[in-house]
């Protein structure tokens, strides 16, 4: 972490596999180990591993003032006539003092916004992107609405795929679960994503698109 802090001082931005901070923000998203995050406000498991040993990006605004923002930029993407940005986000049910905004390339072109969840769980969303004439990147902005110890928002498992997003509820299950999840109400059995024949006599031989 000392090395990362040094980079921040020198360049005013750092990189996470091509992700960048924006120096126009007043504070930064931080890569956070779930077990070390302040509990009751922030997720106690990351979305990827569903354990407290996984990481997510956290915009923690508890010490910040209203209108202060943390900005995280995806890597630059080639121009597209249809792509889909997928991600998971988490806001504590009482934490409506923070807003998550997603912009296309600049803070003047908002794609999506969310200002508080009634769920204490990771939620999925997908956003279609159309930028046929120029390269683009998405910007995740955590915006503090009011100074409050509960002001925080987390994101995890960001991905960008070719083609416009499928309609809500549609899923080929080729890449992931598209935000579908198993019900917790029948914990004795879960659906699994298979790859053709799983074992003799069980599961279909082909995926639905083959
Ligand atoms: Ca993760």
Image: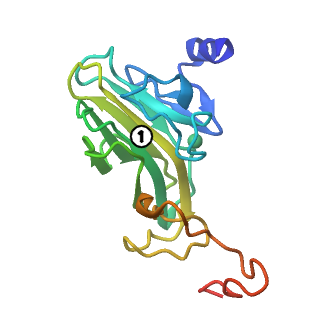
Q: Quadrant of residue 78?
A: bottom right
Q: In this rendering, is residue 119 above or below 147?
A: below
What x and y, as percent, mark residue 166?
43, 73
Q: Is residue 40 visible?
A: yes
Q: Quadrant of residue 90?
A: top left
| The residue carrying mark 1 has its beta carbon less than 8 Å from ligand 1 | no
Residue under the image location 62 percent in, 70 percent down: 193
Left or right, 114 with respect to 54, comes to left
Q: In this rendering, is residue 202 above or below 51?
A: below
What x and y, as percent, mark residue 82?
47, 68
Left or right, 15 with respect to 91, comes to right
What x and y, as percent, mark residue 89?
41, 45
Residue farthest along the front direction in this orientation = 188
Q: In this rendering, is residue 104 above or below 1?
A: below
The secondary structure type at the circle numbered 1 is strand
Residue under the image location 64 percent in, 16 percent down: 1
Left or right, 168 with respect to 9, comes to left
Residue under the image location 77 percent in, 79 percent down: 199
The foreground one among 147 and 67 is 147
Residue farthest along the right direction in this orientation = 200
Q: Is residue 32 visible?
A: no
The foreground one among 109 and 56 is 56
Q: Which residue is mark 1?
A: 140
Residue under the image location 48 percent in, 33 percent down: 44
């Amino acid at each position: 972490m000392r090395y990362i802090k040094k980079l921040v001082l020198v360049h005013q931005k750092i990189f996470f596999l091509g992700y960048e901070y924006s120096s126009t923000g007043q504070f930064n998203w931080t890569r956070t180990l779930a077990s070390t995050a302040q509990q009751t406000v922030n997720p106690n498991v990351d979305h990827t591993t569903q354990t407290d040993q996984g990481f997510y990006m956290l915009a923690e605004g508890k010490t910040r003032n209203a209108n202060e923002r943390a900005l995280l930029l995806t890597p630059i993407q080639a121009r597209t006539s249809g792509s889909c940005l997928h991600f998971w986000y988490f806001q504590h049910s009482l934490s409506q003092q923070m807003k998550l905004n997603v912009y296309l390339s600049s803070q003047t072109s908002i794609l999506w916004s969310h200002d508080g969840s009634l769920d204490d769980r990771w939620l999925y969303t997908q956003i279609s992107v159309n930028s046929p004439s120029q390269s683009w990147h998405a910007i995740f902005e955590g915006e503090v609405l009011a100074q409050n110890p509960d002001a925080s928002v987390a994101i995890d498992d960001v991905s960008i795929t070719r083609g416009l997003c499928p309609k809500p509820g549609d899923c080929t299950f080729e890449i992931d679960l598209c935000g579908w999840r198993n019900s917790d109400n029948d914990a004795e059995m879960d659906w699994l994503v298979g790859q053709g024949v799983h074992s003799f006599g069980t599961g279909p031989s082909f995926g639905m698109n083959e």
